[in-house]
Image (spheres, rainbow, N blue to C red):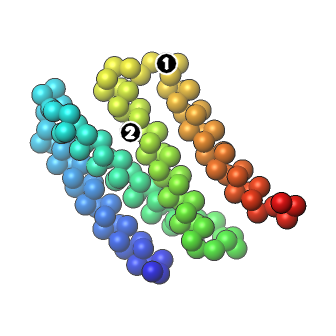
Amino acid sequence: MTLKQYLLLMVLGTAICWLGWGFTLFLVNPLAASALEMSFFYISLFLALIGSGSVLGIIVRRYFIRNDELVFRHVKNAFRQSVLIGVGLVGIFILLGQSLLTWWNAPLYILFLIFLEATFFTKRKFRNSPYV
């Protein structure tokens, strides 16, 4: 699969996810919604954020940050980071929806996600070390 085909499929899937999220946003009453309706809301938002972040990350890495990495590494890094951002935003929205978001657990949650990304980043750097 070429990068152009991947981006085309990703944009198409992302557009479908944003449409699904928009339908749930405007057609579902959150005060009377069932658990299934709320889970569809969060899942469609999560998938839409992953797709948007991944496409945007690939475009930024490919055309604005010129380095000698292979294309699949750009795709892998952009997808991983968009998943972490999606988990962060949807997790905060879920905490907010359950009235569990406080001033102290939101920064801890964000620091945990930053630590997780740093772990992935340093693990990749360590694996590519010539001394290992």
The local secondary structure at tag 2 comes to helix
Is 63 positioned to the left or the right of 100 in the image? right
Image-based side of 28 in relation to 102, left or right? left
Can residue 64 be seen in the rendering of this structure? no
Closer to the camera: disc 2 or disc 1?
Answer: 2
User: Which amino acid type is marked by label 1?
Assistant: Trp
Image quadrant in which you'd find residue 92 = top left
Which of these two is toward me, 59 or 119? Answer: 119
SS type, badge 1: loop
Depth check: give the residue in front, 79 or 8.
79
Q: Residue at x 30, y 41 (%)?
A: 42
The tag on residue 21 is: none
Question: Percent x, y for residue 60?
Answer: 55, 63
Residue linked to disc 1: 103
Furthest residue to the front?
Answer: 132
Q: Work out whether mark 2 precedes mark 1 in sequence or the reverse, and give the earlier one.
A: 2
Percent across and percent down for residue 15 are: 28, 61
Q: Which mark is residue 90?
A: 2
Residue depicted at x 55% and y 63%: 76
With respect to residue 12, does 36 lie above or below?
above
